[in-house]
Image (cartoon, helix red, strand yellow):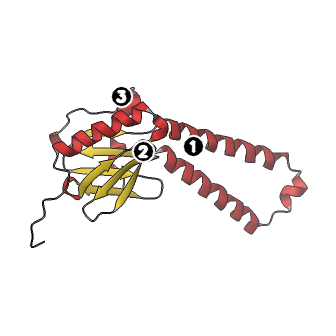
Amino acid sequence: MPDPDNSTPDPDRSDEPNSGSETAGGGRLFAFHPRIVAGMAAGMGLSLIAVFGVIWFRLSPEDRGSFDWFQRLTLLAFFGAILWILYRMTTLRVTAYADRLRIRNVFKSYTLQWSEVTALRFRPGDAWLQLFDADDNRIGILAVQAAEGARASRAAKQLAAVAREHGAGPSKRTPES
């Protein structure tokens, strides 16, 4: 199933995270994509392709021929897994809509309704923004990383403001619940 976040242009081409007021049709209210991690992962992926390509083609035809089909498939599977992880690192993002929050991390993506979000925390020394849900689970939002510096701090504050505007926060529990 296609990712609905991919159907619109990346608003993060400017210096500031997108905090526009698109509300009609469930448009994005906020989106953030890290630049440093994406750049490093892309560089690592290209370097990996170049290094392994040079090594493979520098082998003599006899040496390349000594790899059986299983060894070649194993190398390709390992290479593919590393490239997939690096690709996922380049596509980290957090996107806020009027009715939900979408988080794309390396291995898992989350979609939470605003009523499920109880807190966002980005303390000095934290590696990334942390979200606490209604079940007291902690979810790291890897898109907002301390490595981004002031840009990440602004993004965390903007996301917290959007969350408050849309009903996120501690739930009001009754004595019966």
Does residue 92 show up?
A: no
**Residue 76 at what x, y percent from top left?**
67, 58
Q: Secondary structure at mark 2?
A: strand
As measured in the structure, the alpha-carbon distance from the residue carrying label 3 to the one carrying label 1 is: 22 Å
**Residue 35 at what x, y percent from top left?**
48, 35
CB within 8 Å, label 1 to label 2: no
Residue denoted by label 3: 16
Residue denoted by label 1: 41
Going by the numbered disc 2, the residue's amino acid type is: Ala
As measured in the structure, the alpha-carbon distance from the residue carrying label 1 to the one carrying label 2 is: 13 Å
Q: Locate the N terminus and report the quarter of the image it occupies.
A: bottom left
Going by the numbered disc 1, the residue's amino acid type is: Ala
Q: Vertically, is 40 above or below 76?
A: above
| Mark closer to the chain start, 1 or 2 | 1
Q: Vertically, is 70 above or below 124?
A: below
Mark 1 or 2, closer to the camera: 2
**Residue 10 at what x, y percent from top left?**
37, 35
On the picture, is 152 further left or further right than 171?
right
On the picture, is 23 further left or further right than 33?
left
Q: Which mark is residue 99?
A: none
Going by the numbered disc 3, the residue's amino acid type is: Glu
**Residue 52 at what x, y percent from top left?**
74, 48
